[in-house]
Amino acid sequence: MTAPLDHVVGAVHADVDAVRRARRGPRRRHRLVVLGLGVLTLVALAVNLLLGDYTYTVPDFFAILFGKQVPVATFLLMESKLPRALLALLIGLSLGSAGAIFQTTLRNPLASPDVIGVTAGASAFGVIGVLVLGLQGPAVAACAVVGALATSALVRLVGGRAGGFRLILVGVGVAAALMSVVQHVLARAAIHQAQVALQWLSGSVSNTDWPTVRMLALAMLVLMPLLIIGTKGLRATELGDDTAVGLGESGRRVDQLLVIAVLLVAFATAAAGPVAFVAFMAGPTARALNGGRSTILGAALVGALLVLSADFAGNNLIGDVHMPVGVITGALGAPFLLWLLARGATGGRPG
């Protein structure tokens, strides 16, 4: 009587071992992807800090960082290069993670903050704050945050809960309407006012200061832990609303994650204007590296790598021409969007 029982127990153990082996492979790949992206991001950060118009050796960099005063070099590093590189890093992390949250919860790779109008809402309200209300500094950033929240609420109200084309089309329409408002306001503004407002349309980290870096860092310090807690059940939402509810995940958790993602996009846009297509490209790129599985941390690192690389390229690769980082990422994002459309990865599930 014990032989059949031993056979059954052995079969169960074999199945359990097979499941464990099957789960171990993706986890190992995810760790390798995150480690590789982390190393590349640190390399990109080091390149932005040490190379460029004014170069530093590694010993000089750490000496200045820990208090050594060198005429010109200390000012350029501590007041220009370091805040600029840190802001690019934070913006990339914010937009990359937020874009992956949008695409995963709405189950559509086109449903990024760039496409559905959240970024446009933040930049439009920023421009209105500068040109119409005459605001400056933190008040303009507050306008951008309000704009992102209001736009996302409008798109969700009109587009509904579905993650298909309806929500995306509503977002594209709202973004187009907001850009029309911006063009009208710019056309009526004085030239010097329009130049100030251009930051809210092009996306630039060139005039970064420490208060802006601190503002975004504090926002991420609050939002990132909430995002990490909220993403624990995120994989269930990729299986569809009904399955997610059956696994104990409520629609309220999805809404809370989307609000956090909107705030990350809003604060990033408030710091540097709309850095185009970073949120759009980061999620699918990280998912492709991770064997087709969503990874929020991987997307955040891809976003940081994109922004750091684009800022260095825009500032150094074309002689005396300095292009905003948003122009470079926009040029990269357009063909990426066409590739996604041609690939047909626009269905209900991420591609």
Image (cartoon, grey):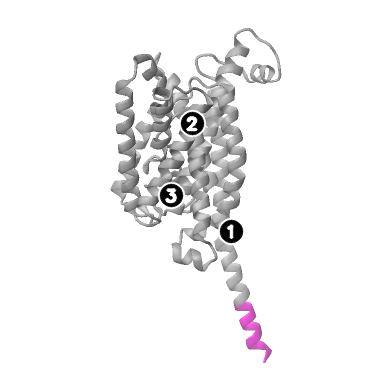
Q: Where does the image place residue 80, in percent across and percent down from the top left?
A: 55, 18
Q: Secondary structure at mark 3?
A: helix
Disc 2 packing (10 Å; few <14; some 14–19; many ≥20): many
Single out the mark in the foreground, 2 or 3: 2
In the picture, the disc for residue 270 is: 2
In the picture, the disc for residue 24 is: 1
Magenta span dominant secondary structure: helix
Q: Residue furthest front?
A: 133
Residue at the (52%, 23%) spot, across then down: 137
Q: Where does the image place residue 285, in percent across and percent down from the top left?
A: 44, 44
Viewer-side residue, 42 vs 112: 112
Residue at the (59%, 23%) spot, across then down: 210
* Amino acid on which the number 3 mark rests in the picture: Gln
Q: Where does the image place residue 222, in percent across and percent down from the top left?
A: 61, 40
Does residue 46 show up? no
Of the numbered discs 2 and 3, the one sitting upstream in the chain is: 3
Single out the mark in the foreground, 1 or 2: 2
* Amino acid on which the number 2 mark rests in the picture: Ala
Viewer-side residue, 122 vs 264: 122
Q: Secondary structure at mark 2?
A: helix
Quarter of the image holding residue 130? top left
